[in-house]
Amino acid sequence: VGARSTLMEMQDLLQRLTKVSIRQQQIVEHLATRQGRTEEELAALRTQTAEHLPLPDPRA
């Protein structure tokens, strides 16, 4: 009974760890998507700013 109980506890632990790992992967993917969007928005803001602000003449 002791060995069977230990085996069941290990199986339960592995199942919980698997669920945590899956959730962690979902969070990482979500954060990567958000980072990509943020980088796109930042690039767009830089482009808009550059259109409205004249760049200094590097020869001056």
Image (spheres, helix red, strand yellow):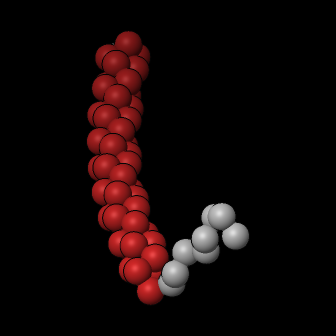
Residue 26 seen by the camera: yes
Q: Residue at x 36, y 39 (%)?
A: 21
Q: Which of the pair 20/41 is nearer the observer?
A: 41
26 w.r.t. 43: above or below: above
Q: Which residue is drawn at 31% across and 26% down?
A: 11
- Residue 19: give x, y in percent of width and height: 30, 42
- Residue 58: give x, y in percent of width and height: 63, 64
Residue 23 seen by the camera: no
The residue positioned farthest toward the top in the image shown: 3
Q: Residue at x 55, y 75 (%)?
A: 55
49 w.r.t. 30: above or below: below
Q: Which of the pair 34/15 is nearer the observer?
A: 34
Quarter residue 44 falls in? bottom left
The residue positioned farthest toward the right in the image shown: 60
Quarter of the image that includes the C terminus: bottom right
The residue positioned farthest toward the bottom in the image shown: 52
Q: Which of the pair 9/5 is nearer the observer?
A: 9
- Residue 57: give x, y in percent of width and height: 61, 71
The residue positioned farthest toward the front in the image shown: 59
Quarter of the image that includes the N terminus: top left
3 w.r.t. 24: above or below: above
Q: Which of the pair 50/32 is nearer the observer?
A: 50
